[in-house]
């Protein structure tokens, strides 16, 4: 086949074009590759809560407040040395004297003589008796049945002192003691001896029906006590 000049030129042009393309391809393969850095923005904020409307909430969760009723009533703790309730009588109660005929008789009796001297029996504790009563409380009255010379006593119920220092006057004074169901041990202790002899006290106890439970007098030395026991039904 005979080659014409035009054909020769065309073939030469294609050869050089092909050679050029191959050179570019090798150059791209040998060129170093660079890594691409993608910068991102970091979010340091806390995610916001997603609010769920009551309509979309689970049916097992109630949106109403739960109220729990306790059978235990809260209050101040009771102490083993809690004082018994004591209320002193007012002057109006003494003025009536409608249930204290014994008091009136004893108050009007002139026993204000000088105390007798100390005797051996004044140094012994005394028991004024055991009594049963359905009364809610006791009216506890006291006085000095002899010469008024500064005698003082204390009163305790079931070994708890309810009045630590009572001064005995010539006329009856008193207060109320609430009785608990069962055993009520009332102790009266002579705190001192007056200026003229032993401690000379007189006590009268009334129930809530104005009936006398116990009435006694004593002549005691300092530190000696007398006891009355009332068992409430």
Image: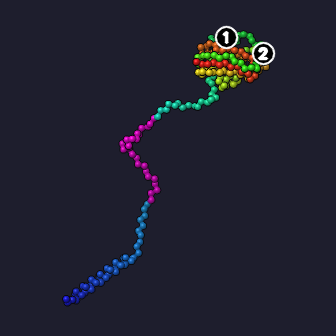
Assign a secondary structure to mark 2.
loop
Which corner quadrant of the image does residue 233 belong to? top right
* Residue 64 part of the magenta-drawn span: yes
Predominant secondary structure, magenta span: loop
Residue drawn 74% across and 20% down?
A: 124
Residue 162 visible somewhere in the drawing: no
Bounds of the magenta span? 42-67
Labels 2 and 1 touching (C-beta < 8 A):
no
* Residue 25 part of the magenta-drawn span: no
Seen in the picture, residue 108 relative to 158 is either above or below; the reply is above
Residue drawn 37% across and 41% down?
A: 59
Viewer-side residue, 108 vs 124 = 124
Which corner quadrant of the image does residue 98 belong to? top right
Residue drawn 62% across and 24% down?
A: 84
The residue tagged 1 is 102
Drawn side of residue 191 relative to residue 185, left or right: right
Give percent across and percent down for residue 184. Answer: 63, 21
């Amino acid at each position: 086949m005979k080659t014409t000049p035009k054909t020769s030129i065309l073939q030469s042009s294609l050869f050089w074009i092909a050679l050029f393309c191959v050179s570019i391809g090798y150059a791209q393969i040998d060129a170093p590759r660079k890594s691409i850095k993608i910068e991102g923005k970091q979010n340091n904020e806390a995610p916001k809560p997603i609010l769920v409307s009551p309509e979309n909430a689970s049916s097992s969760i109630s949106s109403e407040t739960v109220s729990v009723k306790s059978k235990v009533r809260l209050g101040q703790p009771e102490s083993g040395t809690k004082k018994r309730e004591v209320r002193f009588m007012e002057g109006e109660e003494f003025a009536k004297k409608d249930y204290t005929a014994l008091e009136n008789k004893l108050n009007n009796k002139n026993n204000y003589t000088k105390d007798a001297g100390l005797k051996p029996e004044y140094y012994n504790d005394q028991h004024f008796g055991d009594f049963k009563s359905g009364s809610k409380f006791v009216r506890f009255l006291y006085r000095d049945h002899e010469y008024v010379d500064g005698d003082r006593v204390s009163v305790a119920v079931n070994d708890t002192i309810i009045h630590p220092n009572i001064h005995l006057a010539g006329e009856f004074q008193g207060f109320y003691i609430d009785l608990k169901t069962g055993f009520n041990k009332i102790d009266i202790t002579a705190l001192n001896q007056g200026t003229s002899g032993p401690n000379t006290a007189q006590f009268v106890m009334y129930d809530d029906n104005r009936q006398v439970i116990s009435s006694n007098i004593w002549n005691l030395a300092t530190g000696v006590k007398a006891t009355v026991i009332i068992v409430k039904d």
